[in-house]
Each structure stands twice: as structure tokens, then as C-alpha cells.
Image: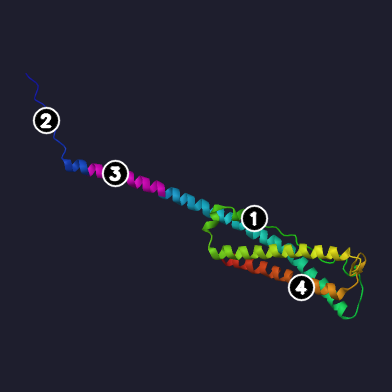
Amino acid sequence: EPPPAAFPAAATPPREWLLRGAFEAALILFGLLGAFTLNEWEDARTRAARVESLFAAVRAELEANVARHAPAAAYNSRIAELLWSEGNKGVEFLPQSAYPEGLFKGPSLTSAAWTTAQNDATLSDVPVDTLLMLARIYEAQRRYVDEFDALLNNLYATAIDPANAAVRIDGIANPLRLGGVLRDYAGRGEQLADAYRTTLEQLSAAP
């Protein structure tokens, strides 16, 4: 007996092919979009973590700077006021024993964390106001250090000038004059200490 004739395969309607193709294309598109979104999310999280790490380092640097600077600034102000006060009383010589820790204390400040942050591309994610605030405090720090170098050079020049015996090995021969100079420098030191504290408070309050 001959085998039954095979039924002819039903042709797939064009509409079904179009729907299937559109569905597969949509799956591919959603897969690509999902992968892109995931990569963007990972990148954003990495950048945010990097910014947080940089700012933690900058904050720690500012805290260390103010911890070192504030006592030195207070000491400089105290010695400057002593010189000024004694000079106004008519004292013409102040022995070195009046300032056993030195005539003034120079700055011991760093900016390595801020320099590193400036060279990092993720800094572009930081609000402009925050960047300007940090730039101002570090610029004030740089100026203060430069002023110290200039003051030190002037004092050395005065000390070795035979025509001017104000600064001597054993003390100060003109406390009123030197007190006036150091009061000005010490005042800027106190201002820098206040600026450190204000900046740290603003960083803590920033979102």
C-alpha cells in the first residue's frame, strides 16, 4: 500500500516574520541599552567614589594644616604683642630669654592632596562653588608661605647689616620696630587659621 502523501508545509505569513524580527531586534536593543546603562552606572559610582576619596584626603590635609598652624599663629601673635608692648613702654632691648621658643614660628603646611585632586579628571564632577572655596584657601596658604620666606630673608639681611643692630644673637635691640612688623605677619597668620576653620565647616556642611 503506498504511503500517505505528506501534507505540504504551511507557508509562514509575512506578518509573522515581521513580528518575530521586530521582537528579536527589540531584545537586542534592550540588551545593548541595559549594558550601556549598567556601564554608565558603574562608571558614575567609580567616579563618585574617587571624588569622595580625593575630598577625604583634602579635608584631612586641611585639618592637619590647621592643627599645625593654629598653635604657631597664636605663638607668633603672642611674641609680636610682647615686642610691641615692651617697645611702647620704652624698652630698648629684649633678651632672647623673653622668647625661648624662637622669635616666631614658620609655617609647616602641605598642599599635596589638593595638587593631586587638581590633576584628577574626576574633579570636573565637583560643584564649582566647592572648587573655588578650596582654591581660595590654598591660594591664601601659598601667599602666607611666600610672605614668611620674604620676612625671613629681610630679617637675615637686617641681622648681617652692621649699620642696623636691631636683630642680635642675644635678643632684640628695637622691639617696637620689629614688633610692628611681626604683628602684621602674625595677624595674617591668625586670618589663615580662621580661614581653615571656615573652609572645613563649609566642607562638612556640603552635600
How far from the left and from the top, in percent, is residue 175?
87, 74
Q: Which residue is mark 3?
A: 25
Q: Give the Cα separation between the discs numbered 1 and 3.
A: 49 Å
Q: Which residues are magenta?
A: 19-36
Q: Is residue 82 visible?
A: no
Q: Earlier in the sequence, mark 3 or mark 4?
A: 3
Q: The residue under label 3 is which amino acid type?
A: Ala
User: Where, quadrant-wise, is the C terminus in this rendering?
Assistant: bottom right
Q: Earlier in the sequence, mark 1 or mark 3?
A: 3
The correct choice, above or below, for 123 with respect to 101 in the image is above
The single residue placed furthest to the left in the displayed view is: 1
Q: Which residue is mark 4?
A: 184
Q: Is residue 20 magenta?
A: yes
Q: Is residue 48 left or right of residue 166?
A: left
The correct choice, above or below, for 180 with respect to 114 in the image is below
Instruction: State yes or no: discs 4 and 2 in contact (Cβ < 8 Å).
Output: no
Q: Which mark is residue 113?
A: 1
Q: Which residue is mark 2?
A: 8
Q: Is residue 25 left or right of residue 129?
A: left
Q: Give the Cα separation between the discs numbered 3 and 4.
A: 75 Å
Q: Earlier in the sequence, mark 4 or mark 2?
A: 2
Give the residue displayed 69% in from the left and 62% down from the top. 142
Closer-to-camera residue (172/66): 172
How far from the left and from the top, in percent, is residue 187?
74, 72
How far from the left and from the top, in percent, is residue 50?
56, 53
